[in-house]
Image: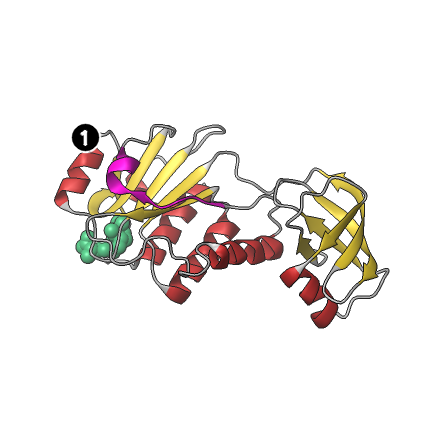
Amino acid sequence: MPDRYYSSEPIEGPAVTLRDNEAHHLLHVMRAKPGFELVVFDGNGGEFAAVVAACQRSTVELSVGERQDIERELPFELTLAVSLPKGDRLRWLLEKCVELGVTRFLPLHTTRSIGNSSGGSKKEPGAKLARYVIEASKQCGRNRLMEIANPIAWPALLTETNYMRHLLAHPGGQPLAEINCQTNKGNDLLLVVGPEGGFTDEEVSQAVGAGWEVVSLGERILRIETAALALVSAITLH
Ligand code: SAH
């Protein structure tokens, strides 16, 4: 796959300007000169072959070719609601979710969640996380960015009705192997993973009451990111 760059500006015409990290990488890491060939995408689907037309001090002008309607998305929408792990573990989780095709990443606050549920720094909430998503998309070839939704609290999540199916990971649930993981196009799914302290009995019974499936991922207690990735992989690779 050729080097891929992300344009924060929608690509609409025959030229686009790359700025910030993307321009920095081209100018100072790749030492690109006019004529350098690359692929550019704007996160709204499709990608474009492009050529460096001009290099400025901190921006790079690209001359953009035809749009290629290449999508590397799942055939259904997959939302992962998850209590956020900290630091590098969150970064790792986000990256892997992008690679596996998660459509929407929903930070979840439950009774036993601790700390800030947005995962962003105080100064620029979300900017760091968005950057992880862009980097992972460049690497894995996704042309649509995984959405990082605003954090949601458990009671509000329970009332979300946009999904055909809801799977909640909880030790002692029904073994995943006994569950039909087959998904069809348009069959949007919500996967839910709890905090290190787990879901409370009340939360689990509320989920059951709402018709959600409570699934076990084996006999061992997994960390948040392992549980999330195991569940996402089981669903996406079927
Ligand atoms: N101490 C908690 C475990 C928390 S692990 C407890 O015993 O419930 C963090 C989250 O990962 C859990 O809330 C659950 O969503 C998921 N998880 C971890 N291990 C799991 C397993 N074996 N089966 C299903 N879900 C699991």
Q: Quadrant of residue 80?
A: top left
Left or right for 104, reference 7: left
Pinpoint residue 88: horizontal percent, then vertical percent: 41, 66
The answer to whether any part of residue 57 appears in the image is: yes
In the picture as drawn, the residue positioned furthest to the left comes out as 201
Where is mark 1, residue-wise?
Answer: 209
- Residue 23 lies, with reference to residue 50, above or below; the image says below
Viewer-side residue, 33 vs 207: 33
Pinpoint residue 7: horizontal percent, then vertical percent: 67, 51
Q: Residue at x 78, y 40 (%)?
A: 13
Q: Quadrant of residue 138?
A: bottom right
Left or right for 54, reference 177: right
At numbered mark 1, what does the secondary structure look like: helix, strand or loop? helix
Q: Residue at x 52, y 54 (%)?
A: 133
Left or right for 194, reference 60: left
Viewer-side residue, 234 vs 78: 78
Label 1 neighbourhood size at 10 Å, few (<14), some (14-19), many (20+)? few
Label 1 sits on what residue type? Gly
Q: Which residues are magenta?
A: 147-158
Pinpoint residue 215: horizontal percent, then vertical percent: 26, 42
Viewer-side residue, 129 vs 74: 129
Pinpoint residue 68: horizontal percent, then vertical percent: 73, 40
Question: Which of the image's four quarters has the N terminus?
Answer: bottom right
